[in-house]
Structures are given as C-alpha cells and as structure tokens.
Amino acid sequence: MARKPTLHPSLKPFLAQVSTAEMALGDIRNGDHVFVGTGCAAPRGLVQALEQMRNPPADVEMLHFFTVNAFDHDADGHSTTRFRHRSFFVGQDMRAAVKQGLVDYVPMSVARVPEMVALGRIPVDVALVQVSTPDAFGYVSLGVSVDIIPAAIARARLVIAEVNPAMPRSMGDSTLHISRIHHLVPVYTPVTEFQRLPLQTDDVQRIARYIAGIIDDGSTLQIGLGHVAHEALQYLTDRKDLGVHSDLISDAILPLLQNGNLTGARKTSKPFKIVASLALGSRALYDLIDGNPLFSFEPMDAVCNPATIAAQYKMVAIAQAFSIDLTGQVCIDQFAGEFYSGIGSQGEFMRGASRSPGGKPIVCMTSTTEDGTQSRIRPALLLGESATIARTDVHYVVTEFGIAYLFGKSIRERATALIELAHPQFRPELFAQAQALGYLSGDQTLQNLRAYPVEEEITITLKDGRSVMLRPALSSDAQGIRDLFHHLSEADVYTRFFRHVRGLSNAEVQRLCNVNYENEVAFVATAGTREESLIVGQSCYFINPTVNLADTAFMVHPDWQGCGLGTALQNCMVQHAKKRGLRGFVADVLPGNTRMLRLARNGPPSVQIERTEDSVHLTQLF
C-alpha cells in the first residue's frame, strides 16, 4: 500500500484550510459556474475528483480558457466529461466534447475575459486552480499560468487550490495570499508538460525560415499558440537583442536564451524582462522560470493591453491561420465547419504590432490543407469559416510560396499577391475566380506558376553606401514598376523603349513583371523596408531558344543612376542565366545610350558590338 505523502512544511500554519479534494468540492452548489485553471496549470486532481463524484451537483457549467490533459477520453476518443463547458479555446481536451455537443465555444479575445468576469457578464462562482506552496509570508504563486486566473479568483465565491511543491514560483504579478483561498488541497504530482513535436515538413520549415527572415535585430516577439511561430524561433540564432512580450512562452525560447540572442535590451516596456502570461513547456522551462526575476508573469489583460503592445519597439506578432480569402479576411478558429483553437489574444497583438515602431503583424499558414486537396487561399471564406482577423488588420501573409505585404493595398493588389502565395496547382482556378468576382481586370494574365524563390533575394551595398534588395519580380510589382517608369527622364524612356511613351498600359507593365520564369525572367531592385519598399530598378531577359541567347532590358531610377545599380542588376541576371545554361545576352541600344554601352563593357568578358546607323547590337557571351 502506497504511503500517504507527508504534509509539506509550508502548509502546517494553514491546517484549518487544508482539505481533501472530495471535501472541498462538496461546497460546490447546484447551478454553479466553475472556473478551471489554464493550460499546464489546470488542477487535474480537482477536475478528476469532480468528474468522479458519486452525486455531483446538478447543472454545473465548467468555464476555462483551455486545459492540457485535464479531461479524460474513452478508448474511442470520446470525451467522458459529465458536465457542460464554456470555453474560449477548443484544444485537444475539448475537441471531442465540442462534437458531442457538450461545449459552448465563445469566440472572443481572451484578453477581454477579465473585464467581462469583473462585470459579472461571464459568471464565476467557483475557481479551481493549481498554485505553488506558500512562502514565509503566506503568498503562493500561480506558477506557469496567470492569464485570466486573477479575474476568476476575484469574482468567485469559493476558491479551491491544489497546492503543488512542483509548481514553480513565477515572478511578476503572479502571487496570491493564501487567505484568499478557501480550501487547500495538497498534491504531489509533476506539473503537466507540453511537448511540441517538431514539424519537419519542408513546407513548414520554409514558412518558418521566411518568417525569421523578416524579423530584425532588436525585435520584441509574441509567439502565440501556433506551431509554425515556435518553429520560426530556431532560425533567429544570428539576431541580436531580441525581446519577448507574449501571451505565451514555450521551450522554443530556450536556445535563444542560451545563445545570447534574447536579451530584451531594446524593449520599450520592461526592457531585459521576458513578459508572458502563461508557459507551455517542459520541466527544463519550468525550472528556469522558478524564482527567476528575468521572467515577469502578468494577467492576460495587462500583457495584451493594446497601448503597451503598440509602444514596444519592433513588435512582431505571429498568427497561424486556417484560411484567408483574396481580400485578406483571415480565419483562425474554424475549419470545414468545425471549431479549432480560438481567437486567443491575437487581435490585440496584430493591431498592436501594426502600430508599433517598426512592428510586423504576420499571418502564416501552409498554402494547402494537410492532404493537399484544398487551397487555404480562397476566393471567399467558406460556409463554416469566420473572419476572425479583419482584412483591415492584415499586413504580412506568409506561405511556403513566399511573403506578401497587404496593408494599404487595393483589392486587386491583394488578390494578385495572394494568388502568388497559393500552391501552383490552384493558381489558375483562383485567378479565374478573382476575375469573375471583378477583383482582377479581364486583360490581366497569369504567367507565374512556380514557388517564389526567396533564396534568390540578395541585399547589396552600392558604391555610395546605400543598400538595395535584388529579387525576382512579382506580378504584384506592377504599380511599383509603373511608378519607376514615371520617374524616368524623357531621354531615359526613349533609350529604353525606342520611342516616346507617356505611360504604360496594364498589358505593358505586366510584361515587365508578370513573367513565367521559363522563357521570361524579371528582377527588381527595391529600397526601404518591405512595408515601404520603392522599386528603384528593373531588369528582364527574354530567351530565344533557337540561339539560346536572351534579349535584355533595364530601367534605373534617376536618383539611383551612377552608383552601380545597373551593374548589380546585370550581374544578378548573368548569374541566373548561367544556371539556366544560356550562352549569353543580346541587346539593341541607341548609339547615344552611353550608360548601356558602358554596362555591356562591364559585363561578361566576351562582348561583340555591331553598329548600324540607327542602333548598336550587343552580344555578351558567358
């Protein structure tokens, strides 16, 4: 027979409050609304004891954000809970119960729940929580989950706490005096650990690398509950002075801490602190949190205060979506009519990051469902899918096929950019549907059916010290190329087009960026951030398969001429063409186009020049 554990010494001064689970739960009344603590700090012993009561109270509703391994399932995967539930998140514990009609899912920001609880609009009569042992002053810690627990405790008539020596004492606004707890139920079990299985699929890792690629030194990170965001952190080990201000933290931060990347030195609010509301992770993370002033655990409404988020320097918020429509509406809590996950506090972080100096709100997802049969990028959200992030709040969207920036863009520009993020097999259908909906004009064509090669993006420093990014052109670059054209002088326009041109038609501008990358290739040079990028140069080549040579053409903004940008674009195209096995480039230029002639002489060593009265024919052999 197992020995009964000895009462923890810290509880001896509070013997009057110490109770068994069965005795404590006996004070729950019929019709009570019972709050259950969150995540890995869910009081599993109390929940199990309540579920197993011989005569449980009637009409009890259990209320929670989300729990981990707190509720049982039978051999067929059905939930065995005896109660109804009201939940703000549909995790693994509740998914079967939702299908069984036992759960009311509440689609609201969890950051607003404390306010609703305080007002009594979300009733809480009893709070079941798990805490640390008390310190010398009688204070326990809420440990790895603070989130909405303080609000529930403040409102509850009855507070029952599992007191667990294994629960770490988190620092910050996470303490509770033992006098506010009515029943103390000692438990001696490990705190639930949450193991994220690495998602090693090529698509997920590509998305994770893309996300990491747009995160700058000094950024403050919100990680959220999505798996892809946590995968992205492994690619940040070359960044400096990252910070964390997040609803949730996980083991993904440990390598960044060990490597010295995560210092919080540039944070605006609480620099040098990791601010979070709950932790889902391993014992290694919990041990690091225990008594560590590096961490500041705070209630969810404080962490998710939009003003605090917006004030953070370079705030990055990452939301994982189930689907997005061509106008930018995002669904993050439903798929195929079923509820998955929840809204969490993603709205506050997306809006806060959008107002942060240098902030980046990022929506990520694989381009197709797991079985590859459906595109997650849709003409319109389906029946059974809701717009949980408004298109007005969407900035970055990332799939395994690239990165799009939508904020401030028109419906046409959004649809064009999102189609390029879709899986190639779905692009023609999406393109046709976008035209049918009037999002795209009838004279626009779909040329590019390949994955965007982010690895071909390069940032270079020009002779005058300015930096530009050289990258493959996208059909969504049309307006930027048109703007570049209108900055050219009349002489530049004439030497580029061999005629006086006042403007570019949609077909003409698409010819410069909407290319198939088979026999047509185009690059652009951009200055500034992705959010405010300016196209300052454009180059393209068109292959003649008969001779295996390609015709070339260039445009360079007048303010960027004479600093080596034309040479950089030419070198970029030469390297690309060599990999394709081309013999060389050809171009016809006007005799007075000295810049183009000089560019040709600075290119491949073998240059043939044939002059006529009206033009100069250049042949550059690799």
Image (cartoon, helix red, strand yellow):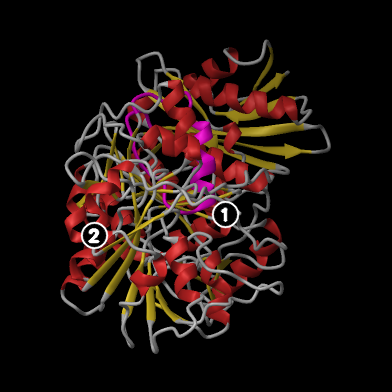
Residue 607 forms part of the magenta stretch: no
Q: Which residue position is annotated with label 1? A: 421
Q: Which residues are magenta?
A: 216-241
Q: Quadrant of residue 588?
A: top right
User: Is 101 located above or below residue 119 in the figure?
Assistant: below
Is residue 106 something one can see in this rendering? no
Q: Nearer the viewer, residue 190 or 367?
A: 190
Figure quadrant of the N terminus? bottom right
User: How many numbered discs sit on the rendered protein?
Assistant: 2
Which class describes the residues within 10 Å of circle 1: few (<14), some (14-19), or many (20+)? many
User: Is 140 located above or below residue 549 in the figure?
Assistant: below
Q: Position of residue 164 (x, y in %)?
A: 39, 49
Which class describes the residues within 10 Å of circle 2: few (<14), some (14-19), or many (20+)? few
Q: Position of residue 568 (x, y in %)?
A: 52, 22
Q: Which residue position is annotated with label 2? A: 16
For the point 53% across and 77% down, which residue is it?
Answer: 81
User: Is 255 located above or below residue 414 in the figure?
Assistant: above
Q: Quadrant of residue 180?
A: bottom left
Q: Position of residue 66 (x, y in %)?
A: 43, 64
- Checking the image for residue 455, the label placed there is none
Q: Position of residue 474 (x, y in %)?
A: 54, 47
* SS of the residue under disc 2: helix
Decide if residue 456 is on the left or right side of residue 34. right
Figure quadrant of the C terminus? top right
Amino acid type for the residue under numbered disc 2:
Ala
For the point 35% across and 15% down, which residue is it?
Answer: 464
Is residue 86 something one can see in this rendering? yes
**Disc number lying in front (2 or 1):** 2
Q: Nearer the viewer, residue 436 or 537?
A: 436
